[in-house]
Image (spheres, helix red, strand yellow):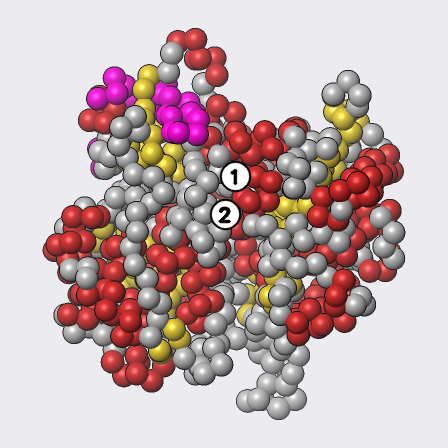
């Protein structure tokens, strides 16, 4: 929709950052872009600091505007598009001829639109013929996805609209800090009493009715203890358990070994606080259990989430119109990004790549024999770890991700990226990963493109273009089309028009768990609120009308064949590392209000950079004093994998055994230089939230490397 003045254009779209996907109105007046919030339900007229400043990113001073190709002297130099694309295609063909199809790999991102994610997965499996594709969402929601699939038969971050939370009496937040990571969500959490589980007294915990502060890596023991109390204090919904679930007896037996005093010894959470938490939940008429990265980013993250789902099922919450379980998905399209083919084990529609029926369906849409589709590949960290090795990929194409900063054991990952024969990065800013690349392809960003995103509540949303991209930048869809043609694929197989890609995505997802076949641009543009599954069929309650979508899952049955949810039989186990000896402290990582993910975008926004300009380490004053550190001192934080530099922030509410590090900063301030590589056996999630470290003053000679 345009204003009457031809020099002024206004569109309704959504914030480019987190999965809340707040509604915004963008106005371009002769090149000056302004943003204001819309009355979209999840933000109801509000925005966070990142949303208000998002237009500044469109005109970042170092915005990529021309392809770059590394020359014989080792320097990236400007090149025209044909030269850059020809270089990539020629080198890919040579690598595949010498080492096989799996020598080429793809690493995607949870910020890509549904159309980009879909076409990227298709490009990897057809144009490259590789099984080696995964994405950075593996580092975010994979543990909750694994647990949700096992429990409910399908995985949608929130199986209910965000707005349902506002009517709750109690909301338990396990490892989530929405007051900083998605502030507009707090508008829906003003009425409920909050029970917050977090080793830190975060901005969210300060607003809680009850804050449980466990040692890092002990959330699973705490969840087992809360189920124990739900059973022993009579808060279980026996009717719900009997009618709508299976496996409760085995889960209950596990929990019976976790009486409150034992849980207190393991977690540090007082038994009285455990009892207070379960009484709040058990006495509520409406309650929700929500997990975030703090519960999920562990080598036992899937089991930890399963234990919280067990608690929610025992209380009768999932499938109830007045309660439920949900995962606070982080990345802007973390939900849609994993539904349409970026994950190593999935095909569009959230279909398993090992399922013969799924392979037949998707291959039919793509016009290829099913046996030509590759099988499952390596998960994200395993893929990065294999780069440049004899048995691993020799080439990597990166779209919308910055693993030099965001991946665990970042120094090692940087070395693996440097060992490649070919690294190609498609991005709109020169991220730390792009600076290592052999070829950099400048792409469009959020306000310069059309497409769809899927929010954390499973609602499909329209991203609308406000203005054209700067000269030289092209869409990811164009990049994939041009590379595919150069690799011998028919051009029609890789549309460059988002609407055409979405029409194909609809067909590919038809009949799958994440069925988008009934969703169209026309319906979205007409203002319909469409949540998947939304099959291409008539509305049973309104003959002649299309299917309305599914805002609330599980009200009548869960997605398993028998319609019942599954309790999980899980047991607490130690993290891969426990403090002691040379590394006496826990380090845990996370986000801060001003920044997003690896910071490649937000660090380029002056207001956000000024709010949080450098890496810091929060620690208790006693912890700092024992290390000879004071407020503002430069500290070296070291783990068995490496060390990073950070300014000390003294926080009296911190546990004395724990250091907190935000992961948004580059160079010597990369928190992921110290994080480990232990993976969850089910989700393949790395253990970002627990690393053993020591802190000490940084020598004067490294002061120039300060973050």
- Front position in the image: 553 or 267: 267
Q: In this view, does 38 lie above or below 31?
A: below
In contact (CB < 8 Å): disc 1 and disc 2 = yes
**Residue 496 place in picture, x, y as percent:** 79, 55
Q: Is residue 477 above or below residue 171?
A: above
Which residue appears at 60% of the width and 55% of the height?
343
**Residue 168 place in picture, x, y as percent:** 31, 67
Instruction: Name the residue carrying label 2.
Output: 139
**Residue 400 place in picture, x, y as percent:** 63, 44
Residue 528, picture quadrant: bottom right
State the CA–CA distance, disc 1 to disc 2.
8 Å
Q: How many labels does the image show?
A: 2
Please give left or right for residue 323 compared with residue 355 in the image. Answer: left
Question: Residue 396, can we see it?
Answer: no
**Residue 79 place in picture, x, y as percent:** 83, 30
Question: The N terminus lies in which quarter of the figure?
Answer: bottom right
For label 2, the SS is helix
Q: Is residue 480 above or below residue 237?
A: above
Which residue appears at 50% of the width and 70% of the height?
154
Question: Residue 344, can we see it?
Answer: yes
Disc 1 packing (10 Å; few <14; some 14–19; many ≥20): many
- Front position in the image: 643 or 251: 251
Please provide the residue range marked out in magenta.
626-653
Instruction: Name the residue carrying label 1.
Output: 407
Which residue appears at 54% of the width and 59% of the height?
335
Dot 1 or dot 2: first in sequence order is: 2
Residue 364, picture quadrant: bottom right
């Amino acid at each position: 929709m345009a204003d009457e003045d031809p020099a002024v254009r206004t569109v309704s779209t959504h914030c480019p950052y987190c999965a809340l996907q707040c509604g915004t109105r963008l106005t371009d007046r002769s090149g000056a872009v302004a943003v204001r919030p819309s009355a979209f339900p999840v933000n109801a007229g509000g925005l966070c600091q990142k949303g208000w400043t998002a237009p500044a990113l469109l005109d970042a001073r170092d915005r990529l505007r021309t392809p770059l190709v590394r020359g014989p002297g080792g320097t990236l130099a400007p090149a025209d598009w044909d030269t850059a694309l020809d270089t990539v295609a020629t080198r890919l063909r040579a690598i595949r001829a010498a080492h096989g199809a799996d020598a080429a790999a793809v690493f995607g991102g949870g910020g890509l639109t549904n159309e980009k994610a879909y076409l990227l997965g298709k490009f990897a499996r057809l144009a490259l013929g590789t099984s080696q594709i995964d994405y950075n969402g593996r580092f975010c929601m994979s543990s909750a996805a694994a647990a949700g699939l096992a429990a409910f038969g399908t995985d949608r971050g929130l199986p209910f609209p965000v707005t349902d939370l506002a009517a709750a009496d109690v909301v338990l937040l396990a490892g989530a800090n929405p007051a900083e990571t998605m502030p507009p969500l707090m508008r829906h959490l003003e009425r409920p009493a909050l029970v917050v589980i977090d080793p830190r007294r975060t901005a969210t915990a300060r607003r809680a009715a009850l804050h449980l502060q466990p040692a890092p890596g002990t959330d699973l023991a705490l969840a087992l203890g809360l189920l124990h109390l739900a059973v022993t204090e009579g808060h279980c919904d026996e009717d719900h358990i009997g009618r709508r679930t299976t496996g409760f007896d085995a889960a209950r037996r596990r929990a019976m070994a976790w009486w409150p005093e034992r849980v207190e010894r393991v977690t540090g959470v007082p038994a009285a606080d455990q009892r207070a938490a379960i009484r709040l939940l058990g006495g509520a008429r409406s309650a929700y259990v929500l997990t975030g990265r703090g519960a999920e980013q562990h080598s036992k993250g899937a089991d930890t989430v399963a234990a919280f789902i067990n608690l929610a099922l025992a209380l009768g919450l999932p499938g109830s119109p007045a309660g439920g379980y949900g995962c606070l998905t982080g990345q802007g399209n973390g939900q849609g990004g994993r539904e349409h083919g970026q994950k190593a084990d999935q095909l569009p529609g959230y279909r398993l790549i090992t399922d013969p029926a799924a392979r037949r369906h998707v291959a039919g849409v793509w016009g290829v024999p099913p046996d030509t589709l590759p099988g499952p590949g390596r998960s994200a960290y395993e893929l990065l770890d294999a780069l440049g090795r004899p048995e691993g990929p020799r080439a990597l194409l990166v779209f919308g991700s910055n693993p030099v900063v965001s991946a665990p054991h970042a120094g090692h990952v940087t070395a693996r990226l440097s060992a490649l024969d070919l690294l190609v990065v498609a991005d709109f800013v020169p991220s730390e990963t792009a600076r290592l690349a052999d070829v950099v392809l400048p792409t469009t960003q959020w306000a310069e493109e059309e497409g769809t995103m899927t929010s954390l509540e499973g609602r499909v949303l329209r991203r609308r273009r406000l203005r054209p991209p700067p000269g030289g930048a092209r869409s990811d869809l164009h990049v994939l089309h041009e590379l595919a043609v150069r690799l011998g694929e028919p051009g029609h197989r890789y549309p460059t028009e988002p609407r055409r890609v979405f029409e194909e995505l609809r067909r590919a997802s038809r009949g799958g768990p994440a069925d988008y076949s009934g969703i169209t641009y026309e319906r979205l543009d007409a203002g319909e609120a469409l949540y998947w599954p939304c099959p291409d069929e008539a509305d049973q309650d309104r003959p002649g009308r299309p299917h309305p979508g599914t805002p609330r899952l599980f009200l009548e049955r869960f997605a398993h064949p028998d319609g019942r949810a599954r309790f999980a039989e899980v047991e607490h186990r130690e993290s891969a590392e426990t403090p002691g000896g040379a590394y006496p402290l826990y380090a845990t990582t996370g986000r801060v209000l001003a920044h997003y993910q690896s910071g490649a975008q937000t660090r380029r926004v002056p207001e956000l950079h000024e709010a949080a300009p450098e890496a810091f380490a929060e620690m208790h004053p006693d912890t700092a004093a024992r290390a000879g550190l004071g407020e503002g001192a430069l500290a070296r934080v070291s783990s068995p994998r490496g060390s990073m530099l950070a300014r000390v922030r003294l926080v009296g509410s911190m546990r004395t055994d724990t250091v907190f590090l935000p992961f948004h900063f580059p160079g010597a301030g990369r928190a992921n230089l110290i994080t480990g590589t232990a993976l969850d056996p089910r989700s393949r999630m790395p253990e970002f939230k627990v690393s053993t470290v020591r802190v000490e003053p940084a020598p004067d000679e490294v002061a120039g490397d300060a973050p």
